[in-house]
Image (cartoon, rainbow, N blue to C red):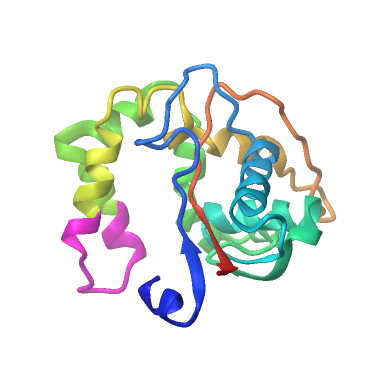
Amino acid sequence: MPTLAEAGFRAVAPYLRGYPPTEIPRDGFYDMGTLATDTAELIRGLGGGTPAYIVGQDWGAAITYSVLAAFPELVRRAVVMAVPHRAQVARSMLDAKHVHRSFHWWFFQLADLPERAVAENDFAFVDYLWEYWTSPGYRDAAHIADIKRMLSEPGALQATATIVRYSIGAKAIRVSRTSDARWINPSRCQRSRSAAATTYARS
């Protein structure tokens, strides 16, 4: 981000709703439509509606696809990483390798167990996912510690945005015999999860 700032951009990486230090209401809205609208309002608020560059990774990528679909006038260019388009996600769920790598999608939809398992033994689950998903030998202790501190905030794991956006993903994607995707847009979710979409606007 400092490099982007030096190049004349204003770089913003927001905390999305449900992630400390933002508020964590138990009955809050965490659906994809709301997160896309949040991002659109951030672009309008920071840039007066001037189209922005958006970079989204993982859940941020999923949010970016929604912003592109609903608010194309606010996006100059977009980079999406780690998560393909939703139609491709639906097809990939027929591939055993991707089902294995995405085991957490299903695990995080179980009742009560995910919250307990993630917090157990100083959030060892976070360490496991880090080792599973990153290049061998790569470690960022400060970043991992920040994640654990965020998850330890009261309410961060319990039926709010941190763990449970995966229920939205499960409802949103249905794999048919022809591998097409059918989309459902729940307006309120008991369980949800978010990850930040980073927006870039020329200053």
- Asked if residue 117 is among those painted magenta in the image, a careful observer would answer no
Q: Is residue 120 left or right of residue 156?
A: left
- Asked if residue 135 is among those painted magenta in the image, a careful observer would answer yes
Looking at the image, the residue that sits furthest to the top is 27
- Residue drawn at x 33%, y 67% is 134
Query: Which range of residues does the magenta coloring cover?
Result: 129-143
- Above or below, comparing residue 194 to residue 156 in the picture: below
Q: Quadrant of residue 47?
A: bottom right
Q: Quadrant of the C terminus?
A: bottom right
- Above or below, comparing residue 87 to residue 39 in the picture: below
Tell me, yes or no, if residue 93 can be seen here: no
Q: Is residue 183 left or right of residue 8?
A: right
- Residue drawn at x 44%, y 45% is 15
Task: Name the spot of residue 60 as percent of width and height, x first.
Answer: 55, 55
- The answer to which of 3 and 97 lies nearer the viewer is 3
Q: Quadrant of residue 5?
A: bottom left
